Image (cartoon, rainbow, N blue to C red):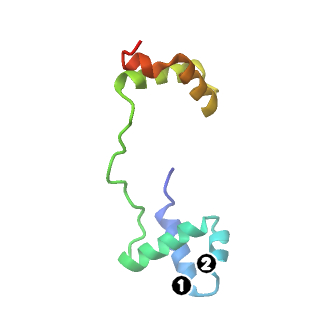
Amino acid sequence: MKSYSLDLRQKIIDTYFEGEISQRQLAKRFRVALSFFEKLLKQYRESRNLAPNVCKRQILTKLNTLQLSILKKIMEAIKDAIVNELRTHVEHKRWFLLANNNE
């Protein structure tokens, strides 16, 4: 998900400190979640920084290379499938057994 622009973040904070609007109304006015505003305000109060936080660690996949390639092929074959359909197809193919050489 793309972060909100620094310009929008600054407008939200400036509007809040003008003191004429509640947090809930402010979130509604700028079409952001109240929780986003609360986090932004906390970040601003602690660091005077409005820049989006950068993800510092990579989330590793639980699938091995072979499993990923099989899953990719299944997804390419069924491009318009929803998650449950993909899961059913994967279970039906028992790709995890093939990947672990258990068959």
Q: Which label was assigned to residue 17?
A: 1
- The answer to whether residue 78 is seen in the rendering is yes
Q: Give the residue furthest to the bottom.
A: 19
Could you say which is closer to the camera, residue 67 or residue 21? 67
Classify 10 Å Cα crowding around label 2: few (below 14), some (14-19), many (20 and above).
some
Residue 1 at x, y percent in the picture: 51, 50
Residue in the picture at 50% in, 66% down? 7
Residue 88 at x, y percent in the picture: 60, 25
Q: CA distance from mark 2 to mark 1?
A: 10 Å
The amino acid pointed to by label 1 is: Phe
Residue in the picture at 56% in, 81% down? 16
The amino acid pointed to by label 2 is: Gln
Residue 35 at x, y percent in the picture: 56, 68
Q: Which residue is mark 2?
A: 23
Looking at the image, is 5 positioned above or below residue 44? above
Left or right of residue 56: residue 11: right
